[in-house]
Amino acid sequence: LDLERDVAKETHMSTYTIPVQPEHIRSITDPHNSSIKTYYALVNVFDLPKDLSLAPDPRVPKPNKVTKRITASLERWDGIFHILNRGITVSAHSADYDTKTKVLRLTIPDDDSCYGILDGGHTKYSIEK
C-alpha cells in the first residue's frame, strides 16, 4: 500500500516594523467583516521599508513629471509633503500596532503579487532617490 502525502507549500513571510507615534495612527474595523482592519498612519519617509514589493501596483514607477514634482516637494522639506501627497497604500497579510513600542508591524507574504504596494509606487520611487 503506497501512501501519498500532500505537502503544503510553505509560505515565507517578511515582517516590516515601522515606528509610528500613537497620535499618527488610526485603525478602522471593516463594517462588513470585523476581522478586517485598515490602518492609516503618518510615517516618516526615512522609516519607510526599502524593500516593500511593488508587485500589486499595475503602474511601474519611472522618472516623469509626477516623480519630479514629488522629489521637488521632498527636497523642499517644508513640512507639508504629507498634505500634498496621497501617500502609499500597502496590502498586508496582517498588521498590528504595538502601543508600548510604538511600532506598526506589517506581515507580507513573499512571492505573492496580491501583497505589497497597491498605490503610491511613484511616491516610493521618489523617496528612494
Image: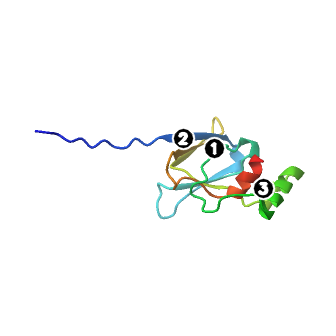
- Which of disc 3 and disc 1 is earlier in sequence? 1
Q: Residues within 10 Å of mark 1 (few under 14, many from 20)?
A: few
Q: Position of residue 69 (x, y in %)?
A: 83, 60
User: Pointer 3: what residue?
Assistant: 82
Q: Secondary structure at mark 1?
A: loop
Real-space CA distance between mark 3 and mark 2, rounded to the nearest whole angstrom: 26 Å
- Which of disc 2 and disc 1 is earlier in sequence? 2
Query: In the current view of this chain or complex, which residue is farthest to the left?
Result: 1
Q: Tag 3: residue type?
A: His
User: Pointer 1: what residue?
Assistant: 51
* Nearest to the observer: residue 20 or residue 9: 9
Q: Tag 1: residue type?
A: Asp
Residues under numbered marks 1 and 3 in contact, where contact means CB atoms less than 8 Å apart: no
User: Pointer 2: what residue?
Assistant: 14
Q: Height in image: 101 above or below 38?
A: above
Q: Position of residue 111 (x, y in %)?
A: 50, 48
